[in-house]
């Protein structure tokens, strides 16, 4: 009875309350940043700094897909690294871009499917398994690319991540990010597959009894997540112009924070793409402000880490208050 | 007659269950033996492919590294046994080690107090993790991934990028790291003693046995009347304190203590725990296995260096080993569950 009650409270609660709170927080962060530096609100500054959130943001959407089913994938940044070094190899061998991109997507799909197979088919604990594949894939990236960085990318390879469009110098990856967001809105909120993700996160046995293959859906979720890592890799090499085995090392903190802060339930079954996008924008504003305030990298990480824990604590606390109020 | 029939049936049932219990106990024992055998296999492979692997000097190096790893892995195992994770142990080593080193450099005459500083900082970090997980109901991976960067950030703020050279540390710390008893490094004896004592406690003292109870079935533990929250908090506290102690030992060994001390240790510690047969779904595993797990990893590490293989192969092997060990454990667990199932 209690579980049902909690669920009804969850669904009855204002659906977009969390997202609205986040929007308010963005407002505050913008105010703080403009006080720090008069240059903050300049279009060029905003457009230029917007490049920093794109590849982590895209991976956050991928991770969200997995978390909605109640699982976890810590290996996404490592998959990204495998893809960047593969692109480096392809570029060095003068492989045409479409083939190279098709290649990294194929590899990413395999790596994601392996994660999915281990977690969904063999029913191994997702956390520990993807912690393992995180190390294994990272090692793989180094094995493929050795420890030497590659910077000689062909311009066609870098186009996606480096091209600035028009007078205003809008980064090309910005519209790409918007398209990806739209795709995820459609896939998660308007397709059967998307509804199944939520259903599995809420009650996997029930889904299984109604004749839907939980294993297949979860594997697809992992594959989709890995594909976002591949796309992230393509953007990454253009943005930084280099590829090395340690690319995007430690980025998982920012990616996971975007997802959890965006109101996605870490136990699955709840969360919107809108929420995640808003939280990506919030983290961007915050990071941008911290950069302008000359706050060092590790301290920025500290603040992001604190935000991650606080966001779960606050939502747990709010839930327990609502349950108590109902009793 | 009916009653008699039922009696024999229940006796048959009892017998079947006791056999199943026996087999499962032996299977778990076999798990530790298999870890030991794979350690032997790894050692043999390196003995044939590299020179000097079995030289006295090299064995000492391996034992040294394995000892330190064993202490951290035992700490991690305490948390894993409760069906939680702690990925912040590397950052705890960093913070506790760095502060202890600074303290030792500033007050070289403070003696044992330095150890207490390291342990109490570790304990405090462990309590923070435990409070967030047990009482804040933050999933352990989220909480400790957060504290991973929080603790590292604090170390960074305290350090201002300044390193502590080991020359600034009191002499007894440096000497203590190399001390031997009957030719065996002191630190190795320490690690073995820790494994034995902790195993004894986990087996015989109710406070510690609860760690297994909560890990194997949290709901049942609560219905039984155990305060699961407290047990989880306790496990994190022990973990933090042990890691703090390991940080002290680590500091006395490395040349320069930087704010990056202990980075990536969480992966290695977790690998040792999982390789050693501690189930990531909690409640099962023993520390002897963890000791062998640490030995395997240290041997691989050392052997790869001797074989002049690039360092990153370690990451790949470690990760793959984690996944393989988890898959194997899940297989064993399912086999045992099948045996206990009523037909």
Image (cartoon, rainbow, N blue to C red):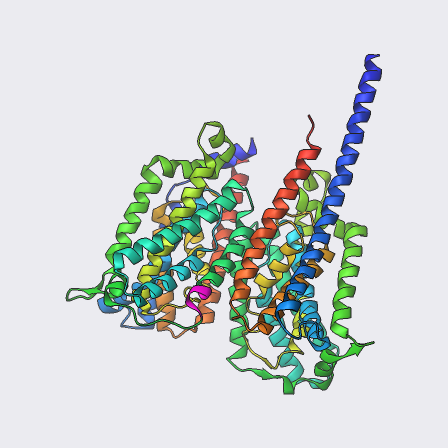
Q: Quadrant of residue A80?
A: bottom left
Tell whether position A89 is magenta.
no
Segment colored magenta: A142-146
Q: Nearer the viewer, residue B170 or A132?
A: A132
Q: Is residue B213 above or below residue A75?
A: above
> Relative to residue B330, is residue B156 drawn left or right?
left
Q: Nearer the viewer, residue A54 or A16?
A: A54
**Rendered position, A281 above or below B180:** above
Look at the image and say whether residue A143 sits in the magenta stretch.
yes
In the picture shown, does residue A1 fall above or below A325? above
Left of B242 or right of it: where is B181?
A: right
Task: Confirm whether residue B238 shows in the render.
Answer: no
Q: Is residue A242 left or right of residue A113?
A: left
Q: Position of residue B280 (x, y in %)?
A: 62, 50
* Horizontal side of residue A5 vs A153, given as left or right: right
Number of numbered callouts drawn: 0
> Can you say which quadrant of the picture contains the C terminus of chain A?
top right
């Amino acid at each position: 009875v209690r579980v049902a009650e909690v669920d009804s409270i969850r669904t009855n609660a204002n659906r977009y309350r969390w997202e609205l709170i986040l929007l308010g927080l963005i407002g505050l962060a913008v105010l703080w940043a403009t006080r720090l530096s008069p240059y903050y609100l300049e279009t060029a500054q905003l457009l230029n700094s917007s490049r920093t959130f794109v590849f982590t943001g895209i991976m956050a959407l991928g991770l969200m897909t997995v978390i909605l089913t109640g699982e976890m994938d810590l290996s996404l940044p490592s998959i990204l690294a495998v893809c960047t070094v593969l692109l480096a190899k392809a570029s060095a061998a003068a492989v045409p871009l479409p083939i190279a991109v098709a290649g990294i997507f194929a590899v990413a799909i395999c790596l994601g499917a392996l994660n999915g197979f281990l977690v969904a088919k063999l029913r191994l604990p997702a956390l520990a398994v993807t912690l393992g594949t995180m190390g294994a894939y990272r090692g793989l990236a180094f094995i493929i690319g050795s420890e030497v960085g590659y910077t000689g990318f062909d311009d066609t390879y870098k186009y996606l991540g480096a091209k600035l469009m028009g007078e205003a110098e809008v980064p090309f990856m910005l519209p790409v990010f918007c398209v990806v967001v739209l795709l995820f809105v459609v896939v998660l909120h308007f397709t059967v597959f998307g509804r199944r993700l939520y259903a599995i996160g809420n009650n996997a046995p029930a889904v299984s009894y109604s004749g839907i293959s939980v294993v297949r859906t979860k594997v697809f979720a992992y594959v989709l997540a890995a594909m976002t890592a591949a796309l992230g890799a393509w953007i990454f090499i253009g943005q930084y112009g280099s590829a090395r085995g340690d690319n995007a090392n430690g980025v998982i903190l920012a990616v996971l924070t975007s997802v959890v802060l965006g109101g996605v339930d870490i136990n699955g079954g709840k969360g919107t793409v809108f929420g995640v996008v808003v939280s990506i924008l919030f983290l961007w504003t915050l990071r941008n402000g911290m950069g302008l305030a000359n706050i060092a990298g590790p301290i920025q990480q500290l603040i992001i880490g604190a935000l991650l824990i606080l966001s779960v604590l606050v939502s747990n606390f709010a839930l327990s208050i609502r349950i108590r109020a109902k009793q | 007659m009916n009653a008699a029939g039922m009696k024999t049936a229940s006796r048959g049932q009892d017998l079947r269950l006791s056999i199943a219990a026996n087999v499962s106990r032996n299977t778990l024992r076999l798990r530790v033996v298999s870890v030991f055998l794979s350690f032997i296999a790894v050692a043999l492979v390196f003995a044939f492919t590299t020179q000097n692997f079995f030289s006295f000097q090299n064995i000492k190096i391996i034992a040294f590294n394995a000892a330190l790893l064993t202490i951290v892995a035992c700490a991690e195992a305490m948390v894993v046994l409760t069906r939680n994770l702690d990925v912040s142990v590397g950052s705890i080593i960093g913070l506790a080690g760095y502060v202890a080193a600074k303290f030792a450099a500033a007050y070289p005459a403070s003696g044992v107090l330095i150890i207490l500083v390291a342990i109490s900082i570790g304990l405090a970090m462990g309590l923070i993790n435990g409070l967030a997980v047990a009482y804040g109901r933050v999933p352990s991976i989220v909480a400790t991934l957060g504290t991973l960067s929080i603790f590292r950030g604090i170390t960074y703020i305290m350090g201002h990028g300044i390193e502590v050279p080991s020359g600034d540390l009191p002499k007894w710390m440096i000497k203590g790291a190399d001390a031997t008893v009957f030719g065996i490094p002191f630190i190795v004896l320490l690690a073995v003693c820790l494994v034995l004592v902790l195993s004894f406690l986990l087996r015989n003292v109710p406070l510690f046995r609860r760690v297994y109870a909560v890990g194997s079935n949290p709901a049942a533990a609560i219905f039984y009347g155990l305060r699961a929250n407290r047990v989880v908090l306790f496990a994190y506290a022990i973990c933090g304190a042990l890691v703090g102690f390991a940080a002290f030992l680590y500091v006395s060994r490395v040349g320069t203590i930087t704010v990056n001390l202990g980075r990536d240790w969480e992966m290695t510690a977790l690998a040792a725990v999982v390789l050693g047969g501690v189930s990531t779904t909690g409640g099962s595993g023993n520390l002897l296995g963890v000791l062998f797990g640490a030995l395997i990893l240290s041997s691989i590490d050392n052997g790869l260096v001797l074989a002049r293989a690039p360092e990153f192969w370690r990451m790949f092997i470690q990760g793959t080993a984690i996944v393989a060990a988890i898959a194997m454990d899940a297989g064993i667990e399912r086999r045992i569950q099948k045996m206990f199932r009523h037909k």
